[in-house]
Structures are given as C-alpha cells and as structure tokens.
Image (cartoon, helix red, strand yellow):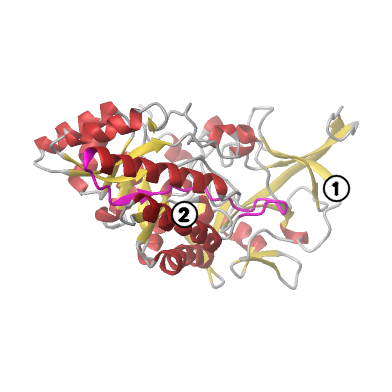
Amino acid sequence: MFVSDCLGVNDQGHLTIGGCDTLKLAETFGTPLYVMDEEQIRRNCRQYRASIETCYQGRGLALYASKAFSCKEICRIVREEGLGLDVVSGGELYTAIQAGFPAERIHFHGNNKTPQELEMALDAGVGRFVVDNDTEMECLDRLAGQKGKVAGIALRIKPGVEAHTHECIQTGQNDSKFGFTLENGEAFAAIRAVQDAPNLCLKELHSHIGSQIFEVEPFLLATEKILGLMTRAKRELGMDIPELNLGGGFGIQYVPADQPVPIGAYMEKISQVIAEKCREWGLDTPYIYMEPGRSIVGQAGITLYRVGSVKTTPAQDKETGDTTRTYVSVDGGMTDNPRYALYQSEYTVVAAQRAADPAAERVTIAGRCCESGDLIQKNILLQKVSPGDVLAVLSTGAYNYSMASNYNRIPRPAVVMVRNGQPRIVVQRESYEDLIRNDI
C-alpha cells in the first residue's frame, strides 16, 4: 500500500512513520510538517556503501547530494555513515562546515560559482571542485595561485545522453547549461587547458545525466563515453585521470507504478562496463564516485497537512469527464512543495487517520497560496476527509524543504526527524519575526 518501508498503520488505523503516530506528530509540532525517518536514511547510506564494496572492491565513495535536503543534522548523519558530500552553493558548503563535515570529502558543484564561493571553498580545503566552464577554470586557477594552493578538480562532461525523465531534470544532453560538451571537442579542449593551469590538478571526469531515472542503460552509455574520453586523454596527452564520477539521478517510488532499479543491481552493471572497457582500452580501473540524493532521503520523508476546507465546484474535466471537482484545501502548498507546479509530479496521498481504509473519493488537493496552479495533486483517489483531518503526502524527503519558499509571506515548516518511535526537531519552524528579520 505504501511506497516506503518506514511507514505503517497502528491499531487505531493511523498512519505511522518510524514508529510514530502521524496524528500525534501533527498535534505536537503543528502543520505543515516535514517528517523524516532517520533509520531509513541510514539504511540507504549503508546500501550504497555495501554496493561499492561488493561490486567494486570498495574502490569508490558515495557522495550525498545535499541539494536534495540540506541541514546540519543530515550532514552529521551522512558523515557518521561514512559518505562524502556534494554541495552546489556557498550556503550548502557553509552548512556542511558548520556541521563539522570533513572538507576533504566534499565536492563543490555548480554551473556559476562566484569568486567569493570559490575562495570560501579553497579556504575550507574542499576535496574537489567540479569545474563547469572555461571562465570558472581560469578564475579558480588564479585564486588558487594567490593562496599558494593547487586545487583538485573534476571536469563536468556532457556525454550527449538523454535520460528518459522530465525535460526540466535532464542534464546530460548536449543542449544543457551544465558542463563541457563531449561531441564537439569542447571537453577534450578543457582537459588540454588544465595542463596549462599551474594551480589546478585534474583528478576526475564527471557526468550527470538527469534525475528520477528508472533505467540503467543511459548510465551505462554515459560511463562508456566518459571512459572513452579518459582513453583519448591518456593516448594523446599522456594524462592518466584516476577518478570517474558517475553522478546521481537514481529514481525512487512516488506512486506504486514507479519501479526503481535496486542500488546493488545498478552498481553491478556499471562495474561490469568499467572493467570491460578498461581492459579493452588499456586504462587503469578508476576510483569511482556517485552522487545519490533523492534515493537516500526521498522515500524517508513525508509532509503532514491539516485540511481546512472541502468543497465541490462545477467543472468540465477533460481527463475524467467529471462535471464537478472536489477541492480539499490544506494549510500548505507550493511554498513547501513546488514540485507539482513545476513538473506535475505525482505523489501518493493518505488520510492519516484512515490510512487502512480504501481510497474511494476523487479529489484535487489544493494549497493555500493565491495561485490557481497551487495544487499538490489533481484528480486522485483519497479516503474520505473532513475539515480538521490530517493528510500525509508521501516521498517528500527530497526537493521539498530544499525548494520551499516564503511566497505570500508564509513561514517555512519545521523538520522533525524520527527514530525508533522518538521524534526530535532538526529544523525549527519559521516565525513571522523570521520573515521580517532582514527587512529595513
């Protein structure tokens, strides 16, 4: 019934997460409320570590992509589980540093890092800069030289692979804002340029083809193409590039129809391709990185809302043929979950107090913002609900808190972490005072 192992139903018929009754969580901490199950997050981290150990003799490291969900507590958990960290901004880097994350295990991404961010990362001693373009390469070389440092870098390569996912989250095709294009020679020129940069050391080639991907084949094709570029660099430039970053983008289950590839199966096939091509092309087997984000925290999180009103209005729905539409309005919306407005993302929604009952009523879940597009789901089946009931939207652990905003001057929700039936706040709910803190 549910899309996550950390969810269940108790004797009262209430939805639970990590052994906690969601109705009690909503009553104690208020709504909207993000709830994350710590044990599931840790299990997912360990699965990635185990897959590298089993399939690749431990010669690799999973880097948690903190853009999926960033706060000091998740940085601490990832550190304790032995993963590295992928950050994409000065803010994410600052959060990691404040949480005590080892800088040498941090990779710094981003297609337009500012000079101030690059200086901050150099001073912190981050392990890798994932360089996106020539301008960044020149700036980083200059700044590193001024500080008397040599920066270890990765080059982000567009392998020309189009993943089968929403066009807004495809990143590996040629027409993408990210990285150096492989097919037109730009990527090879960038490798050559590093040889002339005295304060840069090329350690790694990086490829990321998109997000929420359910197929292994695009990853295999991208891997083969990047290994081919490594081979050319060795043969023509005498450069041995020791590391390969395969990126992230591994899909999760939002609705029952979603069928993600098991982590172990993915790594097994990737390892086979790497071993085969390295033998064929005379390459040393590279150390590998991967960057899971959504697949670590996505299904470990839910969002709880309180129903404010239920109303039925006239409608001419082309999808269902219905002549009426029932709107269930909740106390959150696009400010805490913009993904439906952006991508029409599908979710599983459960009436928390009737979690074991069949979903029999067709409704549209509406947010509270002054936008007609502020919806969480449209035309879904849900258990019968009334004003005051609690709704749970499942698999919201990734890209919900991270993308939340203060549109309409709505404070962002709290984040509660649960473990073995015990909840604790890891991010405080914003107050109205927080909203005006920077106003003059």
Sequence order check, earlier mark of 1 and 2: 2
Q: Residues within 10 Å of mark 2 (few under 14, many from 20)?
A: some
Helix, strand or loop under label 1: strand
Residue 122 drawn at (x, y percent): 20, 43
Magenta region, residue range: 237-260
Question: Please, what is the dominant secondary structure of the magenta stretch?
Answer: loop
Residue under numbered circle 2: 273
143 within the magenta span:
no
Residue 316 drawn at (x, y percent): 87, 27
> Distance between the Cα atoms at labels 1 and 2?
48 Å
Q: Which mark is residue 63?
A: none
Viewer-side residue, 284 vs 301: 284
Residue 213 drawn at (x, y percent): 58, 46
Image quarter hosting the N terminus: bottom right
Residue under numbered circle 1: 361
Regarding residue 399, the answer to whether it shows in the image is: no
Question: Which residue is pictured at 56% across the width and 59% down the height?
Answer: 300
Helix, strand or loop under label 2: helix
250 within the magenta span:
yes
Q: Relative to residue 332, is residue 211 drawn left or right? A: left
Q: Amino acid at mark 1?
A: Glu
Q: Relative to residue 152, is residue 160 drawn left or right? A: right
Image quarter hosting the C terminus: top left
Q: Measured along the vertical axis of the image, is residue 189 above or below residue 347?
A: above
